[in-house]
Amino acid sequence: MDRFVIEGGRKLSGSVRVGGSKNAALPILFATLMTRGRSRVHNVPRLRDVEFTLTILRELGMAAEWLGEHTIELEVVDEAPCEARYDLVRRMRASFCVLGPLLARRGKARVAMPGGCAIGVRPVDLHKKGLEALGATLPLEHGYFDAVATRLRGAEVFLGGHTGPTVTGTANVMMAATLAEGTTVIEGAACEPEVTDLADFLVACGARVQGQGTPRIAVEGVSELRGCDYTVIPDRIEAGTLVLAGAMANSDIRVEGARGDHLGAVSDVLRQIGIRVVREDGGLRVHASRDVDPVDVTTQPYPGFPTDLQSQLMALLTIADGISVITETIYPDRFMHVAELNRMGASIRKQGASAVVSGQRQLSGAEVMASDLRASAALVLAGLVAKGVTEIQRVYHLDRGYERLDERLAGLGAAIRRVEGPGEAFEGGVA
Ligand code: EPU
């Protein structure tokens, strides 16, 4: 298994480019199951989760190939296969997004129910509720949804749950609705930019979708979707992670391609702790030049502070000048990084769904273990400033969602290198 070795204490400088959004690209790739003709999807990041998605799509009868560094060409060649095996779904939860497209286009889908993962229980009841409202039946037997829909029909459905809207649930129901008879209205829809990007892709394929980016999405069903050329939005979570890396290293860097309008809550929190994030033409600039102040932050659905940047912000607050409280409302158990950050000298106490972070003057390098994608990113950020050497094991978690993060941070001046180990099975399981 590969590991990262980081020598802390270097300043960062220069500029780094943000890649295409993982969480936008995955549902868009799954949506091509519903299209006739060829699609070319551009700005797709080279990640393990994307490779894994292509494996699933090929099993489901698609031709899918890379054309150059970040473009994938896809076309349906066989509409008979309808099963997404447990062995696939358990490794990458986003693969549950085959359900809506398969039901809409092929009338049936046998998809394993995903289990919990390192960040929590993660139910799929809202996906089921939405697809049932459109007329599908989804009996659960032996761990599989054996879903059938002779004809999907538009309906009104409320998708808000106990913790707010569901991102991939909104995606699944919106995709299914594009080929349903009549109009579907999704109330309590997720407003995340990744959902908007999927809707824009569907529109480019001929779907009629309105209201994306708001809690009320209306979809008027059409009889057919055709392949198209589409460019995925930049990854706001990767951009936020890079911005936080600049802040952590008390440096001045530019994040090329980052969309300031997708990172409003993050910029606001950084401003509160004394770091300036300035929107420039085509990117964001981070100015960090002094000790950071503590802050209290609660994760929320978009446009609030994203849960996917909670662990990285926590890494930064471990060196703040005072006590911060981070409250996690989306995944109350998403705190696997706490124990590892504490091994590096941080002082974090978990209290229910909150973490109380007492800022320390200095972290110290240690051997730590990555447990999931965003927790790994937090350990990398901590390693950038820790005294001495930090070794992060199991960086395959990180490779699921960040393309060559080591090389890109090294390009900014960080002393980070990858040490290759024997290959490991792709166990995935979170995002
Ligand atoms: N929820 C339900 N019922 C459902 C679905 C969700 O109660 O049927 C609850 C969840 O338990 C959670 C909340 O709703 O408390 C939000 O979950 P959501 O469904 O929005 O999460 P997701 O769609 O499974 C996506 C991202 C995650 C990101 C979340 C929240 C993808 C592939 N994954 O997951 O990304 O944390 O939205 O923004 O888009 C990551 O990239 O590291 C990652 C985990």
Image (cartoon, helix red, strand yellow):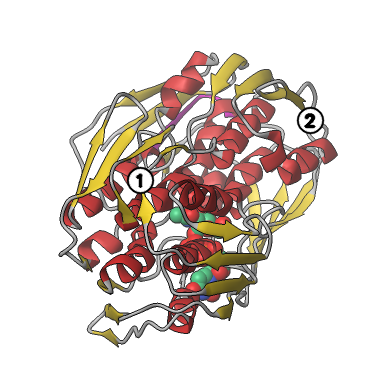
Give the vertical position of 175 relative to 194 (above or below).
below
Looking at the rendered structure, the kind of residue marked 1 is: Gly
Q: Residue at x 43, y 41 (%)?
A: 401
In the rendered image, residue 345 lying in the magenta stretch gets the answer no
Give the vertical position of 49 relative to 42 (above or below).
below
What residue is disc 2 on?
A: 275
Disc 2 crowd rating (10 Å Cα; few below 14, some 14-19, many 20+) is: many
Q: Is residue 386 left or right of residue 268?
A: left
Residue 254 visible within the image: yes
Q: What are the residue bounds of the magenta stretch?
A: 386-393
* Cα gap from disc 1 to disc 2, whole angstroms: 44 Å
Picture coordinates of residue 300 (x, y %)?
68, 59
Q: Image quarter for residue 192?
A: bottom right
Q: Main secondary structure of the magenta part?
A: strand
Q: Is residue 395 left or right of residue 312?
A: left
Looking at the rendered structure, the kind of residue marked 2 is: Ile
Looking at the rendered image, the quarter that the C terminus falls into is: bottom left
Q: Residue at x 68, y 59 (%)?
A: 214
Q: Secondary structure at mark 2?
A: loop
Q: Residue at x 54, y 13 (%)?
A: 413
In the depicted view, which residue is nearer to us: 165 or 241?
165
Q: Secondary structure at mark 1?
A: loop
Q: Earlier in the sequence, mark 1 or mark 2?
A: 1
In the depicted view, which residue is nearer to us: 29 or 91?
29
Looking at the rendered image, the quarter that the N terminus falls into is: top left
What residue is disc 1 on?
A: 227
How many labels, in total?
2
Picture coordinates of residue 182 (x, y %)?
50, 74
CB of mark 2 near ligand 1 (< 8 Å)? no
Give the vertical position of 358 relative to 127 (above or below).
above
